[in-house]
Image (cartoon, rainbow, N blue to C red):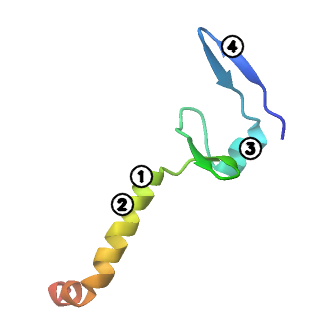
Amino acid sequence: MKLKLRSVGTSTGLVLPKEMLVRLRAKKDDTLFAIETPDGYLLTPYDPEVEKQLDLGRGFMKKYRNVFRALAK
């Protein structure tokens, strides 16, 4: 898909086609993240920092699963 950079005041903006926004499940005023990969950039609505925190939490919960089960009783 071809994208065009446009002037927005003293900055440069990128206009995303409606089809791309639908696939990204993004809408006006949402935040998108550009993540650098070996193949280029990945544009995503998911914050990689939040994903790291969730992975740490999942690991913690898995490690102490028995303790959480006992506390849940």
Q: In screen coordinates, is 1 left or right of 70?
A: right
Spatial separation of the CA atoms under disc 2 and disc 4? 36 Å
Residue 49: assigned label = 1
Q: In screen coordinates, is 4 left or right of 28?
A: right
Nearer the N terminus, badge 2 or badge 3? 3
Tell me the amino acid under the disc marked 1: Glu
Question: Which residue, given by chain and number where applicable, does mark 2 sit on?
Answer: 53
Nearer the N terminus, badge 4 or badge 1? 4
Using a 10 Å C-alpha cutoff, classify the residue at mark 1 as few (fewer than 14 neighbours), some (14 to 19) or many (20 or more). Answer: few
Question: Which residue, given by chain and number where applicable, does mark 3 sit on?
Answer: 20
Using a 10 Å C-alpha cutoff, classify the residue at mark 3 as few (fewer than 14 neighbours), some (14 to 19) or many (20 or more). Answer: few
Using a 10 Å C-alpha cutoff, classify the residue at mark 2 as few (fewer than 14 neighbours), some (14 to 19) or many (20 or more). Answer: few
Q: x, y percentage for residue 29?
A: 54, 32
Spatial separation of the CA atoms under disc 1 and disc 2? 6 Å
Spatial separation of the CA atoms under disc 2 and disc 3? 28 Å
Spatial separation of the CA atoms under disc 4 and disc 1? 30 Å
Spatial separation of the CA atoms under disc 4 and disc 3? 21 Å
Q: Are marks 1 and 3 in contact (CB under 8 Å)?
A: no
Tell me the amino acid under the disc marked 2: Gln
Tell me the quarter of the image containing the C terminus. Answer: bottom left
Q: Is label 1 or label 3 in front?
A: 1
Residue drawn at point x = 36 percent, y = 60 percent: 53
Q: Is label 2 or label 3 in front?
A: 2
Callout 3 secondary element: helix
Q: Is label 4 or label 3 in front?
A: 4
Instruction: Examine the rendered structure and indicate whether residue 11 appears above or below residue 14.
Output: above
Callout 2 secondary element: helix
Question: Which residue, given by chain and number where applicable, does mark 4 sit on?
Answer: 7
Tell me the amino acid under the disc marked 3: Met
Residue 10: assigned label = none
Q: Are marks 1 and 2 in contact (CB under 8 Å)?
A: yes
Q: x, y percentage for residue 48?
A: 47, 53
